[in-house]
Amino acid sequence: MKITFYGQNSLAIQIGDTHLLVDPFISGNPLSKDQVDIHSLKADYILLTHAHQNHTLDAETIAKNTNAIIVSNFEIANYYEAKGISVHSMNHGGSWEFDFGKVKYVNAIHTSSFPDGTYGGQPGGFVIEGEHKNIYIAGDTALTMDMKLIPLQTELDLAILPIGDNYTMGIDDAILASDFVKCDKILGVHYDTFGYIEINHEEAKRKFYDAGKDLMLLDIGESIEL
Ligand code: NI
């Protein structure tokens, strides 16, 4: 499994020959818009955690370029289906065996509306099991006891957690979240894009290190292999 970071919560995940994109927000992100050409991105599936623009901005364009299937909650799936895009709708607690692996849509505590005010259902995260590697994409969320449910069923190899504070968990809560999901390998997301969520990278890494955990902060376009 190869994971590439495109800023904010935007990720490309390659599982075998299948390309997933998560929360594509690139053309409007000052940190990534000049570094990543959305027309060059491959996507078989686009996973959306919630409807906020800083997670969905480029989803329609990329889906139409690639014929990717958008996977999200029922309301978000309906929103894109009405635009002629192929979708797979899910809802909280539900799993589906896709051709690349198993995906579960799990709880997040946040909000979810499109920029025009359209209701975007309840926000979520994804647990993905594929190629013998398991990852948790928390999406935008507060720290929540529901995270403790995840390791009852899935032994995670990587937890992708928001760490920017203000709109989501900050660093201290993300450390607790990694305890809750029983995964000490963390990829930090949802930081630095806007003023309210700028973080001190060294301080963040040190706090995780002091808690016995490994926080990775990738450059735009940088990849890791699991
Ligand atoms: Ni959000």
Image (spheres, grey):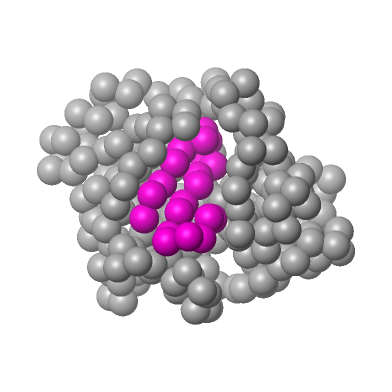
Figure label count: 0
Rendered location of residue 68, percent (x, y): 68, 59
User: Which quarter of the image is occupied by the N terminus?
Assistant: bottom left
Question: Which residue corresponds to the image point at 54% horizontal and 55% vertical from the top-left?
Answer: 20
- The reply to whether residue 146 is in sight is no
Q: Nearer the viewer, residue 215 or 61?
A: 61
In the displayed structure, does residue 76 sit left or right of residue 105?
right
In the rendering, at what x and y percent does residue 121 appear? Answer: 69, 63
- Which of these two is toward me, 79 or 119? 79
Which of 194 and 87 lies nearest the eye of the viewer?
A: 87
Q: Is 8 rendered above or below residue 156?
A: above
Residue 80: x %, y % from top left: 78, 60
State the residue at coordinates (59%, 30%): 36
Front in this rendered view, residue 172 or 135:
135
Report whether 60 appears left or right of 21.
Answer: right
Our reading of the magenta stretch's main secondary structure is strand
